Amino acid sequence: MRWELAMVASCVLIVAGRSLASDRPAILLHGNAAQVKIDLAGGSIVDFRFNGEHLNPLGWNAAPQGHTAPRAMGHFLCLDRWGAATEAEQRHGMPYHGEATQVTWKINQEPRRDQEMVTATMTAQLPLAGLKVKRTIQLADGEAVCIVKEQITNQNKLGRIYNIVQHPSLGTPFLDETTIVDSNAGLGFMQGQPLPSEAHPAVQWPYARNRQGEQVDMRYMVDTEDPSVVAYTIDEPYGWTTAATPKHGLLIGYLWKTSDYPWFDAWRAVQDGKPFARGLEFGTTGWHVPFPQLVNQHKILDTTIYEYLDADQSVTKRYVIFLFRIPESYRGVARITLTDGQLAVHERDADNERGLTMQVGNLFE
């Protein structure tokens, strides 16, 4: 196994026999099956691909050449909030989705191989929020699977509420009109529309309603993004979501404990009449509003919409990212199982299911 590390600007990484120029600080974990790259100017996971292949599902909002400031790209972290701050908080500098993408992350442990895994750790300090996040990322040597553990610590002298939402953002060329998104999500509601009530009943994944009241299948997106963001609860012990683009032969997926992240938030964006971005978001909230409204509401669909961290308290949350090669006739995912260390992705509506499996061990220990 080999790995390369870019810690300063104007560096060159050697990846799969070709050079990948970068003027942004980044860290690269390289296994025998796949590679994953984290941009340190904002902490985003910006690249996850099979070795020797160019297709990267997490290519959304890549920084232009010469742009070195922290920014949200690919899979980014929303912390200490999801959505906007209050007007007063904004006057003090609190950005949309919190500070995690607006600071430079520090490498604590460079990538090293240990028991068939390549492991690295990094941290970020969020000065306005008073939070510290430590991320440990492990890339399997022989499989395209990555385990991410994040520990959030409240460094304030007083307790506070917060939210953490993982924001995987799919971009082109992986994302197109044929991309199929699947999940085990349950009941949900549309952002910007009335909250679920007797007069405005909840929707059930994979369906939602646009602003004209018409039913929309959220598994697909072609030339319209309405509804743009729909939040769904997860009713099973583990939540999962996948995105498959059969014509490109690639599927990316995420798996997490529902106790860590009880919400799945589906974001869609169209540009010039074509798919531009899809967010496979999962986190501790499903409502895209400032904290005062979250506190007043407390729960939606009997699921909490924020968490509390006492002074000096830490909480640790985990998730898994994986890739599979798929045939051009692949129909999407019906369910995912995790049994005796084997991750299995079961195909939807297939007479002869093309089972996708990998050995992953104890992912959530």
Image (cartoon, rainbow, N blue to C red):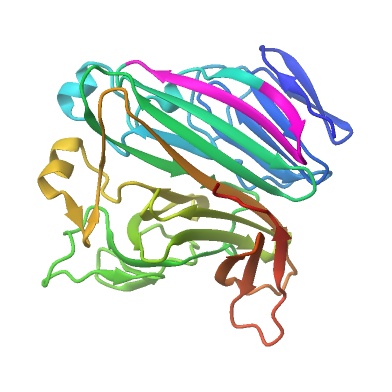
**Residue 41 pos. (x, y %):** 54, 21
Residue ranking furthest to the right = 17
Dominant SS of magenta comes to strand
Residue 180 horizontal side relative to residue 247, left or right: left
Residue at position x 51%, y 22% in the image: 123
Q: Quadrant of residue 106?
A: top right
Residue at position x 57%, y 49% in the image: 320
Residue at position x 67%, y 25% in the image: 27
**Magenta segment range?**
110-127
In the image, residue 258 above or below residue 135:
below
Residue at position x 71%, y 26% in the image: 111
Q: Is residue 111 magenta?
A: yes
**Residue 15 pos. (x, y %):** 82, 32
**Residue 224 pos. (x, y %):** 42, 60
**Residue 54 pos. (x, y %):** 77, 44
Q: Is residue 340 magenta?
A: no
Front residue of 69/149: it is: 149
In the image, residue 139 above or below residue 248:
above
Q: How many marks?
A: 0
Q: Is residue 168 visible?
A: no
In the image, residue 209 above or below residue 258:
below
Front residue of 67/313: it is: 313
